[in-house]
Amino acid sequence: MTETTPLPSNEMTLNIRTANRDRKAEIAVDPTVTVSEILEAAMQNWALPADYDYVVRSDRLGTQLRPSATLIGSGVREGDILEIQPIADAGSPGDRLPEILRWLDPVEDRPWA
């Protein structure tokens, strides 16, 4: 049995994945960060192709989340699954972002067999 570090009271645990499900991770994040910050952090961590735009979809809610909305303002809850979906004809990710989330499964940043 492995020990887990308790989350600070201002963090929630979420699962994020790519639409094709070849990448996924459990993350701890402050619920007041924006959807676009989650997206940009995932793009950097997973080195997602910059020739696409991406949207974030809530699996539980069944809706696309507004980039400018906070997680809590979007109705995201502890344990939710967020899916990163590509849209063709894209821009590029922004400059280096501050670390806004903590990857709980660092080995999960590679594709599954």
Image (cartoon, rainbow, N blue to C red):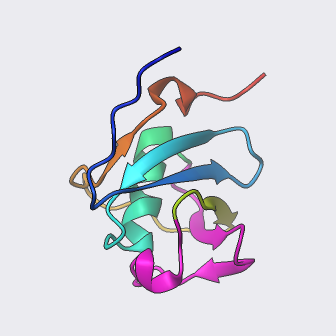
Residue 51 falls within the magenta-colored stretch? yes
Q: Residue at x 50, y 83 (%)?
A: 74
Residue 11 relative to residue 63: left or right:
left
Residue 19 falls within the magenta-colored stretch? no
Measured as percent of width and height from the top left, residue 20 is found at 77, 48
Residue 20 relative to residue 18: left or right:
right
Measured as percent of width and height from the top left, residue 44 is found at 41, 46
In the image, residue 102 above or below residue 55: above
Q: Which residues are magenta?
A: 49-77
In the image, residue 43 above or below residue 6: below
Image mark count: 0
Which quadrant would residue 9 be assigned to in this image? Answer: bottom left
Outermost residue toward the left in this view: 98
Quarter in which the C terminus is drawn: top right
Residue 11 relative to residue 97: left or right:
right
Q: Residue at x 53, y 73 (%)?
A: 76
Instruction: Residue 56: tell me if it is visible.
Output: yes
In the image, residue 53 above or below residue 46: below
Foreground of the two, 91 or 30: 30
Which quadrant would residue 88 be assigned to in this image? Answer: bottom right
Foreground of the two, 99 or 85: 99
Measured as percent of width and height from the top left, residue 84 is found at 62, 60
Instruction: Residue 47: tell me if it is visible.
Output: no
Q: Residue at x 53, y 81 (%)?
A: 75
Measured as percent of width and height from the top left, residue 109 is found at 53, 31
Residue 19 relative to residue 71: left or right:
right
Foreground of the two, 5 or 90: 5
